[in-house]
Each structure stands twice: as structure tokens, then as C-alpha cells.
Amino acid sequence: MLRQSENISSPCKLICDLDLEKGQCVGCGRTREEIARWLSYTELQRRAIMAELPGRLSKSGK
């Protein structure tokens, strides 16, 4: 269980809009599944996903 003082890394930019064609959020680049499971991922898993997001967003032109 997380303590209140623990920060969870998140790429969320509060632009929550799913591109249904690409299957990812246009704001952060995460997939619907990644968004839904974000809190269950370890910090290492979150950082690995976050490392992929710039490439995803550049491919989508954002």
C-alpha cells in the first residue's frame, strides 16, 4: 500500500483524449490498458513505459 508521501511517476498532462485509431492518449501517449493499470505497475515498469512515450507521440505528430 502506498503512503501519502510517496510520489508516483506519471506522464499525464491532463489532456485525456483517446485516439481510438491509434489506441493511445493524445496527451501522454499511453494506451488505454497502460492508463487503467498505471497504479499497479512498479516504478520500474512506469519508467520503462515513460521512456517509450516520446517516440509514440512523435509518430502521432503530437
Image (cartoon, rainbow, N blue to C red):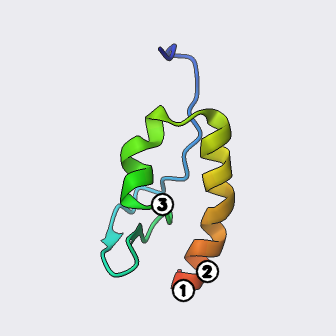
Identity of the amino acid at label 1? Gly
Label pair 1/2, CB-CB below 8 angstroms: yes
Relative to residue 1, is residue 12 depicted above or below?
A: below
On the image, the x and y values in percent for residue 17 come to 32, 67
Mark 2 nearby-residue class (10 Å; few <14, some 14–19, many ≥20): few
Q: Residue at x 36, y 46 (%)?
A: 36
Disc on the earlier residue, 3 or 1:
3
Query: Which of label 3 and label 1 is nearer to you?
Result: 3
Q: Label for residue 30?
A: 3
Identity of the amino acid at label 2? Ser
Cα gap from disc 3 to disc 2, whole angstroms: 13 Å
**What residue does disc 1 label?**
61
On the image, the x and y values in percent for residue 3 come to 51, 13
Q: Residue at x 39, y 53 (%)?
A: 33
Give the total of numbered labels. 3
Label pair 3/1, CB-CB below 8 angstroms: no
- Which element carries disc 2, helix, strand or loop? helix
Identity of the amino acid at label 3? Arg
Relative to residue 42, is residue 46 depicted above or below?
A: below
Judge by depth and name the residue closer to the eye, 37 or 4: 37
- Which element carries disc 3, helix, strand or loop? loop
The answer to whether residue 20 is left or right of residue 53 is left
**What residue does disc 2 label?**
58
Q: Label for residue 18?
A: none
Q: Quadrant of residue 37?
A: top left
Mark 1 nearby-residue class (10 Å; few <14, some 14–19, many ≥20): few
